[in-house]
Image (spheres, helix red, strand yellow):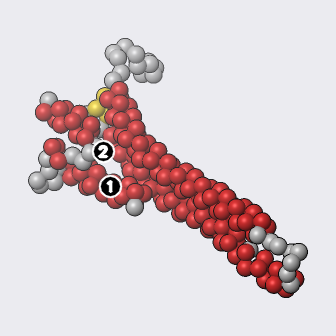
Amino acid sequence: FFNIRRILRLAPETRWIQAFRTNAPGFSMQDAPRLLAPIAAVLGERQRRGRAALSALSLRHLLDSISSRLDENRDIAGYLRNLLIFLGLLGTFWGLIQAIAAIGGVIGGLTVGSGDFVEVFNEFKAGLLEPLSGMGTAFSASLFGLAGSLVLGFLDLQAGQAEHNFYNDLEEWLSGITRLAVPEGTLPDLGGG
């Protein structure tokens, strides 16, 4: 759900950018989504001054801010993947501990000296059901942890691609409204006279 939320969270951000670019009716700088709040603040201030262009330094600062906000979500998704693997391993060891304890109980409960061999063997078979149950817990926990991690990894990959596409589109748009400052006298003479 967290990774799907990451993807769905980009929709209002994209709508806000489109509304800003087209100056849609009812558009307000104060309605900026959380991720684009720094951009809205800078562009709102620049619009009030009558110039919507950004400097290259402002562009870099804004993109770094957006990138760090996106990275926070990637860190949480990575933590959740690793948590599933850890829980799978924890369940594996728990199941193995149960199995080993049950095997010890079965072996300790065997009495071969005073009984029929068939009865002892049937008792041994019945006693092995508990260790097998522990082994089942161990393997199912491992399978759950690894399968869950695989699914979360795929969803994280999809969310990451959506965030990268959003970031690249944002970078291209902001680059289009960025004014590069070139100090006077630093342009090379191209031999035009």
Between 37 and 44, the one lying in front of the other is: 37
Residue 75 horizontal/vertical position (percent) = 47, 44
- Residue at horizontal 42%, vertical 57%? 3
Kind of residue indicated by mark 1:
Arg
> Residue 50 falls in which quadrant of the image?
top left
Between 118 and 168, the one lying in front of the other is: 118
Q: CA distance from mark 2 to mark 1?
A: 9 Å
- Residue at horizontal 38%, vertical 31%? 60
Is disc 2 in contact with disc 1, using a CB cutoff of under 8 Å?
A: yes
Which residue is the site of mark 1? 9
Label 1: how many residues lie within 10 Å, few (<14), some (14-19) or many (20+)? Answer: some
- 56 vs 18: above or below: above
Residue 110 horizontal/vertical position (percent) = 80, 72
Residue 143 seen in the figure: no
Q: How many numbered tags mark residues here?
A: 2
Residue 79 horizontal/vertical position (percent) = 50, 48
Secondary structure state at the residue bearing disc 1: loop
Kind of residue indicated by mark 2:
Leu
Q: Earlier in the sequence, mark 2 or mark 1?
A: 1
Would you say 26 lies left or right of 79 here?
left
- 22 vs 1: above or below: above
Label 2: how many residues lie within 10 Å, few (<14), some (14-19) or many (20+)? Answer: some
Between 188 and 86, the one lying in front of the other is: 86
Would you say 14 lies left or right of 27 here?
right
Which residue is the site of mark 2? 35
- Residue at horizontal 70%, vertical 76%? 129
> Residue 149 falls in which quadrant of the image?
bottom right
